[in-house]
Amino acid sequence: SLMHTVHEGNEWVENLAREMNWSCVLDITYEELQKNGEKLMKRVENFLSIPYEGHRPDFQKALSNNPCEVVLNYQNICGYFYSCPLFRPFVEDEEAGCLCVNEKDKHDPVLCDHELLKKAIREDPNEDLKMIGDTRHT
């Protein structure tokens, strides 16, 4: 699944950078840019060894940062993905106060294991993928 691929890709890059002791990798996030744009730009310019020019990122978001406000079926999405701890950071935003409700203590071993998930999809390609990982229906 896309979420497995993103998670595995992030882990792979982080592990490689750590193992290689790369000093040429600066780990930044979009969220950090949103919250502390000027401070982050200082870090980037310092990392690149270029003089700080004092430019503040000039962007305006069209939508709220709170996924609960912009995703109409947010709690449904929680039902599909919260049962895998790997995916929880993708669906919950504690800072925005956007949390999955009624999803605690659920675990779906198929959803969490990329190989098992691919096998389940191969075994029944007509399976409603929304049902895989939706522990509300088990």
Image (cartoon, rainbow, N blue to C red):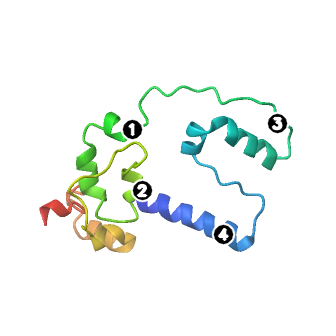
Residue 133 image-quadrant placement: bottom left
The alpha-carbon separation of the residues under discs 4 and 2 comes to 22 Å
| Relative image position of residue 30 (x, y in whole percent) | 56, 43
> Please, what secondary structure does the residue beneath circle 4 have?
helix
Please tell me which residue is depicted at 28% across the width and 65% down the height of the picture. 121
Q: Earlier in the sequence, mark 1 or mark 4?
A: 4
Say left or right for 123 vs 65. Answer: left
For the residue marked with disc 3, what is the amino acid? Answer: Tyr
Give the Cα distance between marks 2 and 3. 33 Å
Mark closer to the chain start, 1 or 2: 1
Mark 4, Cα crowd under 10 Å, few <14 / some 14-19 / many 20+, is few
For residue 17, side relative to residue 124 (left or right)? right
Residue underneath mark 2: 89
Residue at screen point 24% across, 67% down: 106
Q: Which residue is mark 4?
A: 16
Earlier-in-chain disc, 3 versus 1 = 3
User: Where residue 56 sits in the image (x, y, percent)?
Assistant: 69, 29
